[in-house]
Amino acid sequence: KLRPIVAIAEIGEKHGFLDLDYGAASDEAEALLAAASDASERTCEICSAPGHIDPKQTWLRSRCDNCMVMDCPAIGGVH
């Protein structure tokens, strides 16, 4: 089975989750890109643990509870 091919023009972050700018894509490719964006909303951007976006923060970003309070081994903290 062939994998979908799509040209990504720009990769960024918007409102705390993955934002992709791409040209024409098959339905399968669009579904994969949407799944990646959705997963980024639930994945800590520092340590890849399950995370969430805290709307109370001034800068929206996806973090696990430990990284949210800067207590993650990935950034030098201790659990």
Image (spheres, rainbow, N blue to C red):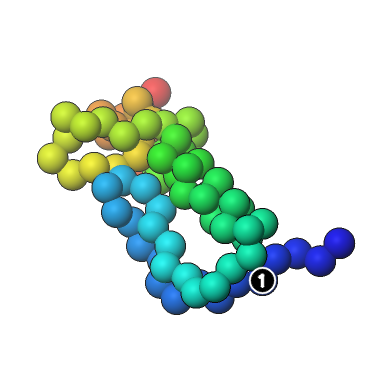
Q: Label 1 crowding class (10 Å Cα cut-off): few <14, some 14-19, many 20+?
A: few
How many numbered discs sit on the rendered protein?
A: 1
Q: Residue furthest left?
A: 58
When the figure is inspected, residue 9 is found, relative to residue 56, above or below; the finding is: below
Q: What x and y, as percent, mark residue 67?
A: 33, 34
Residue nearest the observer in this picture, 2 or 76: 2
Q: What x and y, as percent, mark residue 37?
A: 47, 49
Task: State the residue at coordinates (36%, 62%).
Answer: 12
Which corner quadrant holds the C terminus? top left
Q: Helix or strand or loop: what does disc 1 sit on? A: loop
Instruction: Mark yes or no: residue 54 visible.
Output: yes
Instruction: Mark yes or no: residue 47 visible.
Output: no
Q: What x and y, as percent, mark residue 42?
A: 44, 35
When the figure is inspected, residue 76 is found, relative to residue 28, above or below; the finding is: above
Q: What x and y, as percent, mark residue 63?
A: 35, 36
Residue nearest the observer in this picture, 40 or 75: 40
Which corner quadrant holds the N terminus? bottom right
Task: State the residue at coordinates (63%, 58%).
Answer: 27
The residue at which mark 1 appears reads as 5
Question: Looking at the rendering, which quadrant does residue 70 occupy?
Answer: top left
Residue nearest the observer in this picture, 8 or 73: 8
Question: Looking at the rendering, which quadrant does residue 77 occupy?
Answer: top left
Task: State the residue at coordinates (21%, 32%).
Answer: 55
Task: State the residue at coordinates (31%, 34%).
Answer: 53
Q: Is residue 4 left or right of residue 23?
A: right
Q: Amino acid at mark 1?
A: Ile
Residue nearest the observer in this picture, 79 or 22: 22
Q: Residue furthest right?
A: 1
